[in-house]
Amino acid sequence: MVARRTCSSLTRLSVSAAMACGLGWPAYATAQGTAPPVAPAVPPVARDPQSQPPAPPVCTLDLRLPGKMSDIVSNVLLRAERKPGSDVRAFLKEAVEKYATGEDLRRAAADHFKIDQKRFEALVEQWRHINCKHAPIPGYAVPDAISDGANGEPRTPVPVCSFAADVTLHVVLHELGHAVIREFDLMVLGNEETMADAFATHMLTEHFPERAHAAIAARVTSLMIEADEVPRDQWSVRGEHDNDARRAYQIAALSIAADSQKYASVAEIVGMSEKDIRQARDYGADIHRAWRRTLSPLWMPAGKPSTEARFRADEATLAFVEAGEPSLRSTIESAIGRIDWHSQVTVEFVGGDGGAVWIRNARTIKVSGEYLRRFVAQGAKVGSTSSGRK
């Protein structure tokens, strides 16, 4: 017979004996002078990151600043309200310095251009993210499509025409030359329009050789067509631009300086003699060398396009810029993306009235549908929708 052990002396009991006496761990531990063990912490259950909703994009644009408001107001006035570019630029140039807040500038713009204040405020809100780099904001759509006049009808698409696209490429690179000159404060030691033509021709011959012949030949042909529409004794010698025939000759001369054999047919368009060609190769080489040295510090690293470059086209111009292989759009995007911009620069095609212009305060090159149609008509005049790409 096994003798029974009593539970009168808890201090002499083992754990198992204490449990046999019906004692729980806390009572036994108290008797022993031992603290009960702390239960191990339960690790938090990790949530599946894919199940978490993405954080909404944060917009840091501060429209309280007149300069920031000016960029949005410019888009609204030019693209939505279709106000003349010269009037918009003149107003905003003074307004940025004159008004202390963005709201004051917005109100002044509505008053100046006789637009209802509430309607203008709504338009500014609609366009406020047009230049933003953050992820798309739910419910916000970039208002690129613009309608004609008061009837609200969509603009007729610009016809696809390779000759017109080739002319336009040189035109856009010309405006890009103005952008580079102004954004990087290049010295202007002569006529800036002539510099911009030289920049465009240099960019094509040096960096886009596969598009260069077609674009230069088309641009020279276009300028000669326009020169021939005016009697020679009325060719202008006034203003910032040279007359069209002179511009055509200078573009041809620079192409000859790059490669006299490849661009021999361009020289023929403007009637260059052998002597003209020899002289062009001499002085034109100096111009190309100067542009190479000037632009070399401004290039992005190879294979890394600028994150500040933007391209937009509305419904009326989209088919025109995307036609062909390579398309006009892809070439322009490549050109603007090669430059190490310090702030956002945009190339924008918009159906409607106007020409092609670099808008400094908006840092935008704007090309109008009317201007494109002008080149389409010239393409029909030369008897082909192609400029003979080589």
Image: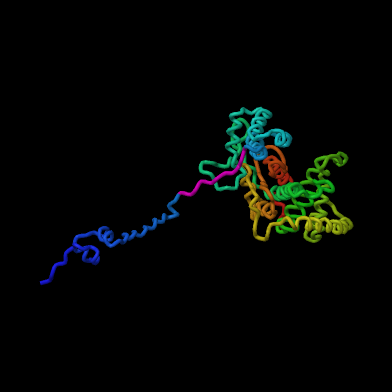
Q: Is 168 placed above or below 38 here?
A: above
Q: Which of 319 and 41 is in front in this view?
A: 41
Q: Is 262 placed above or below 57 here?
A: below
- Quadrant of the image for the N terminus? bottom left
Q: Is residue 12 left or right of residue 75?
A: left
Q: In which quarter of the image is residue 314?
A: top right
Q: Residue at the spot x=59%, y=37% of the render?
A: 154
Q: Is 94 placed above or below 192 here?
A: above
Q: Nearer the viewer, residue 18 or 103?
A: 18
Q: In which quarter of the image is residue 43?
A: bottom left
Q: Does any portion of residue 383 appear in the rendered image?
A: no
Q: Is 150 placed above or below 282 here?
A: above
State the image coordinates of residue 104 (x, y, percent, origin top left).
65, 32
Q: Residue at the spot x=83%, y=54% of the render?
A: 253
Residue extent of the magenta highlight: 53-63
Q: Residue at the spot x=13%, y=70% of the render?
A: 3
State the image coordinates of residue 190 (x, y, percent, origin top left).
84, 47
Q: Nearer the viewer, residue 130 or 82?
A: 130
Q: In this view, does 302 lie to the left or right of 56?
A: right
Residue 102 within the segment the image draws in magenta:
no
